[in-house]
Amino acid sequence: MALVLSLVVMSAALMVFRKTIVDTRVRMARKEVQAEATEILDYIEKYLSQAMINDLPGGLQMHFIGESHQVKFIAPYSPGEGSDLAKFGIYLDRDVVKVQVMRVDRENPDFVLPEGFPGAQPLGRNVTGFTFTYFDGQNWQSSWDTRRQGKDRQLPVEVKVTLQVESAFPVEGKRILQEFTRVIKLSPAVETEEKSIT
């Protein structure tokens, strides 16, 4: 009888111990996923919220090109050699969010957004879904392109970024998957002052 009771107590203790380990791993995975998503969204908000367009002619014209899975824009960048502006491109490549930053300087003296994403670097990993939607003040749209807006071009009022991030390691055979959404407010003003490039 004592042996049976001992086995029951030991089994119960092992179950509690195992559950504690699983719960700890789940919490760690959720924290990892949260940290990855926060880093991605903070970076995007920092620069996307400052996106600029203008009505200058030719290569000095700034545009905003947004699609459901990528966005390109001009925004202020950290001071350095050349202009204080840069061309940004953000997109999902398999399960990696990548960002391309091209400072406007003597080598790249215009504001033309390049085809593709030359020199893109990883911004966040383990991302299984990544979408942008654009708010015009009344409706959400799946794309936004100031090149097609004529003289009255405007930025979207807001951009909604939605991403799904999963944990790098599985817990109980499954990866933890969470969805995050952030709405980023943009200034609708059109920039008309010419920026000098040194």
Image: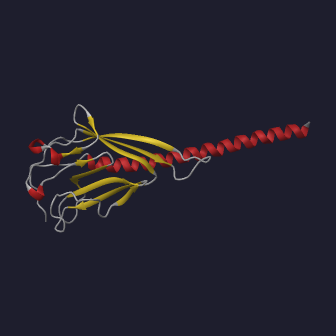
How many numbered marks are there? 0
Q: Is residue 90 above or below residue 155?
A: below
In front here: 120 or 23?
A: 120
The image quadrant of residue 27 is top right
- In the rendered image, residue 108, in percent from the top left (x then y), is placed at 18, 65
Query: Which residue in the rendered view is the most extreme toward the top?
Result: 138
Tell me the quarter of the image containing the N terminus. top right
Identify the residue shown where x is 22% and y is 40%. Answer: 156
Residue 195 in sight in this render: no
Query: In the picture, residue 87 is in which quadrant?
Result: bottom left
Q: Residue at x 44, y 41 (%)?
A: 179
Tell me what residue is drawn at x 29 percent, y 41 percent: 142
Residue 84: x, y in percent?
19, 58
As drawn, the residue found furthest toward the front would be: 148
Q: Residue furthest bottom?
A: 107
Q: How was this image coloured?
A: secondary structure
- Residue 81 showing in the rendered view: yes
Residue located at (76% from left, 39% from top): 12
Image side of residue 19 versus residue 126, left or right = right
User: Where is the C terminus found, in terms of image quarters?
Assistant: bottom left
Question: As rendered, which of 122 and 134 lies closer to the eye?
Answer: 134
Q: Nearer the viewer, residue 149 or 45?
A: 149
Query: Residue 77 location in percent, x, y?
Result: 24, 56
Q: Is residue 8 left or right of residue 20?
A: right
